């Protein structure tokens, strides 16, 4: 008997084995009923049987072997894709999802070969069946990963939102204690609370911005007509107050008027300068140069220090990226490793670009912002 006919005839025994195996995938399957354990298994099997009965060219076979089978035109999702979403929502791991397909492959082939005896099973059917299972697995893994990522982003969004209220209460209380002038010990404790609250606020802001970008929403900007030199000078003054032991230099030349989101560009500059302070030579200045020409304004943040390795430099703007020598850096402990990623997203939200260069002499981050006022708002 050909394998497609066997699957169509013996769907129930195959599903019984699928259910038995799925029930062993704990803890997710602990309280699942038969219908949930068999979720979309019948549809997956029938889709495989239909595939086996469909003629296939060599090119189509090659595409399918790489998980690129043509999409169905009569459904928005395949059974394998829907199955993956439901398994992800039920708490299965991706390894357990893959194990279901391994078990399905083994049980179908074993049952079919037993049924074929003493005849020899059709080798082409075995090849086509493995291709179809691999395609279903590829579809499931892709949708499972997408669902897990979406769940993670939603969790981060809710976490960042829900932590803001208690953090604001801490900050307000700390400011109240500081204003009481109730002695040096109380004032010192309040000051520590204020500094820690500000650091937590910065982490939550980074988390919120990262989450927005990963959800495809981008960094939200509200452009207005500003003098960028004045806006960045205010930020440099604040950074000098926070880091009195470091020398920060600001140089401005050319026209710095334009339409941008001033607060976001202050955030961008802060991230670049803090990065330079953390990882640059401690006894040398961090230089901020703002240069305006007819169409763009350029911001360069430069520090002296060891060169960034080429491999690290290539992914320096990726989220959660730090160099090997920065993993245990004490200054990095209060950072999520999102600063440069967010700087890139802020530049992109202004239709600008950012790049990094590093050699034995210095490291420089350069941001180019178009002066035109055609920036999309509310991203």
Image: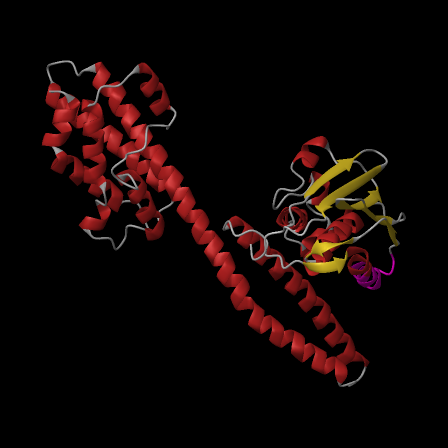
Check residue 72 for magenta coloring: no
Q: Is residue 36 left or right of residue 370?
A: left
- Name the magenta segment's main secondary structure: helix
Residue 275's x, y, as percent? 75, 49
User: In the rendered view, would you say 199 is above or below 125?
Assistant: below
Residue 350's x, y, as percent? 65, 49
Q: Which residues are magenta?
A: 234-245
Quarter the N terminus occupies: top left
Which residue shows up at 68% across the image and 32% down it? 311
User: In the rendered view, would you say 283 is above or below 363?
Assistant: below
User: In the rendered view, would you say 66 is above or below 269?
Assistant: above
Residue 62's x, y, as percent? 36, 19
Which residue shows up at 16% across the image and 27% down it? 111
Q: Nearer the viewer, residue 275 or 289?
A: 289
User: In the rendered view, would you say 76 is above or below 213?
Assistant: above
Q: Nearer the viewer, residue 55 or 227?
A: 227
């Amino acid at each position: 008997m050909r394998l497609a006919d066997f699957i169509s005839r013996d769907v129930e025994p195959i599903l019984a084995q699928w259910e038995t195996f799925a029930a062993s995938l704990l803890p997710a399957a602990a309280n699942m009923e038969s219908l949930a354990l068999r979720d979309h298994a019948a549809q997956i099997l029938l889709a495989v049987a239909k595939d086996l009965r469909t003629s296939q060219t060599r090119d189509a076979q090659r595409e399918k072997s790489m998980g690129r089978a043509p999409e169905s035109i009569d459904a928005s999702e395949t059974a394998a894709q829907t199955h993956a979403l439901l398994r992800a929502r039920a708490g299965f791991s991706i390894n357990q999802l893959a194990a279901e397909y391994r078990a399905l492959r083994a049980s179908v082939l074993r049952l079919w070969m037993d049924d074929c005896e003493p005849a020899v099973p059709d080798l082409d059917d075995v090849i086509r069946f493995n291709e179809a299972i691999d395609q279903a697995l590829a579809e499931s893994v892709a949708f499972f990963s997408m669902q897990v990522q979406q769940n993670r982003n939603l969790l981060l969004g809710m976490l960042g939102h829900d932590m803001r209220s208690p953090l604001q209460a801490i900050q307000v209380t700390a400011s109240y204690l500081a204003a009481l002038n109730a002695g040096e010990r109380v004032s010192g404790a309040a000051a520590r609370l204020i500094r820690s609250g500000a650091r937590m606020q910065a982490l939550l802001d980074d988390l919120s911005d990262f989450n927005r970008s990963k959800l495809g929403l981008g960094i939200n900007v509200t452009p207005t007509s500003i003098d960028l030199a004045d806006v960045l000078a205010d930020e440099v003054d604040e950074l000098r107050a926070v880091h009195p032991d470091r020398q920060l230099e600001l140089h401005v030349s050319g026209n710095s008027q334009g339409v941008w989101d001033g607060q976001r560009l202050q955030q961008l500059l802060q991230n670049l300068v803090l990065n330079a302070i953390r990882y640059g030579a401690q006894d040398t200045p961090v230089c901020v140069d703002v240069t305006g020409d007819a169409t763009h304004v350029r911001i360069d943040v430069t520090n002296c220090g060891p060169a960034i390795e080429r491999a690290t430099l290539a992914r320096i703007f990726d989220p959660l990226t730090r160099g090997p020598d920065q993993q245990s850096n004490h200054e990095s402990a209060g950072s999520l490793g999102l600063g440069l990623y967010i700087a890139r997203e802020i530049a992109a939200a202004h239709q600008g670009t950012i790049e990094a260069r590093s050699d034995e002499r210095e490291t420089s981050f350069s941001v180019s912002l178009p002066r035109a006022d055609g920036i999309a708002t509310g991203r």
